[in-house]
Image (cartoon, rainbow, N blue to C red):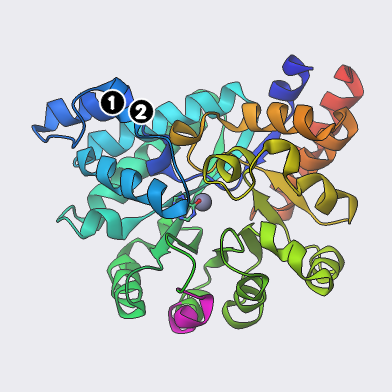
Amino acid sequence: MEEFVRGLPKAELHLHIEGTLEPEMAFAFAERNGVSLPYPSVDALRAAYDFTDLQSFLDVYYATAVVLRTEADFYDLTIAYLERAAADGVRRAEIFFDPQTHTGRGIPFGTVVDGIGAALADGRERFGVSSGLIMCFLRHLPPDEATATFEEALPYLDRLLGVGLDSSEVGNPPELFTEVYERARSEGLRLVAHAGEEGPADYVRQALDLLGVERIDHGVRAEDDPELVARLARERIPLTMCPLSNVKLKVFDRLEDHNLGRLLDAGVMVTINSDDPAFFGGYVGTNYLRTAEALGLGPDDLVQVARNSLEATFLPDDDKQALLDELDAYVGADAP
Ligand code: HPA
Ligand code: ZN
């Protein structure tokens, strides 16, 4: 089963590149950049990964991101992720980055995008992983700053696939960001947003109706609103779910309690992703495997989830179809 799942051609659609910063890498970057981390050792940093909620994670996540300073740091971080992703059967990755986390401490936007972008180009060659970059706005900062970030991104728009919205959710609803999403849409960017991770089902509705997003990142709380669940299924709106993240951040007490299986049964276009794998205890393959084990999902369910992930990509139809054909060939040949 493990070999079958890791080999399943799949897309990863909910992955924060800053969340792939492994503790060892954080200390190596800190040393080469002459910056210090607020933790004395790799073990002490790992020990801080005992989160009580989203905010307790974000505090550590932003604290470790200070070691990312040069184009080489962003390159090394990204290429390491792509290598791991390829080993988990990822054929397409639509990757989030948080420019404000970096520009806010004086790192130029171009340094971030050039470093990540060079790794994405090499990852395509070396590992055969197709990719795109989604710029997320930090919702705990004022909407004006999201707009200013969008303006800073204008010279780089051809490198961006879309925009997203992340960080502290409760109290920072999607409706605050309608203007910047309107601008992103007018520039031809694809639209996604985190919604219904800790925030209410209404934030999922706002993201759909006010921001016009095409996918919902997380969306677990949509289940509180049966009409919304029916709409997600009817309109085939993908949810990029991250089961191990949700347990680490106490959205669910145990993986066995996760609602991914129920939403899948309700016909929602559910996908499995890793969110911030260096912090949450597993990359995408491990998320598939542990979720299957906890929820009793079989090979057919996991093939459906992988198929959903490929269908939910922002690839042109031909490229999407080529990956779906690859999945069909794999399932035909290798069904366990
Ligand atoms: N939720 C919100 N913001 C984030 C996350 C998340 O899971 N990961 C990184 N930034
Ligand atoms: Zn996320």
* Residues in magenta, as a range: 172-180
Say if 104 sits above or below 186 in the image. Answer: above
Q: Nearer the viewer, residue 10 or 171?
A: 171
Q: Name the amino acid, label 1.
A: Ala
Based on the picture, tell me whether residue 174 belongs to the magenta stretch.
yes
- Using the image, determine if residue 243 lies above or below residue 137: above
Number of other residues with Cα within 10 Å of mark 2, as a class: few under 14, some 14 to 19, many 20 or more: few
Q: Residue furthest left?
A: 34
Q: Are marks 1 and 2 in contact (CB under 8 Å)?
A: yes
Q: Is residue 270 visible?
A: yes
Whether residue 93 is in magenta: the answer is no
Residue 221 higher or lower than 211, as above or below:
above
Measured from the top left, where is residue 232 in percent x and y?
A: 79, 66
Q: Which dot marks residue 44?
A: 1
In the displayed structure, does residue 239 sit left or right of residue 265?
Answer: left
Q: Secondary structure at mark 1?
A: helix
Q: Give the main secondary structure of the magenta stretch.
A: helix
Q: Which residue: 63% across, 34% down?
A: 91
Quarter in which the N terminus is drawn: top right
Residue hosting label 2: 47
Amino acid type, callout 2? Ala
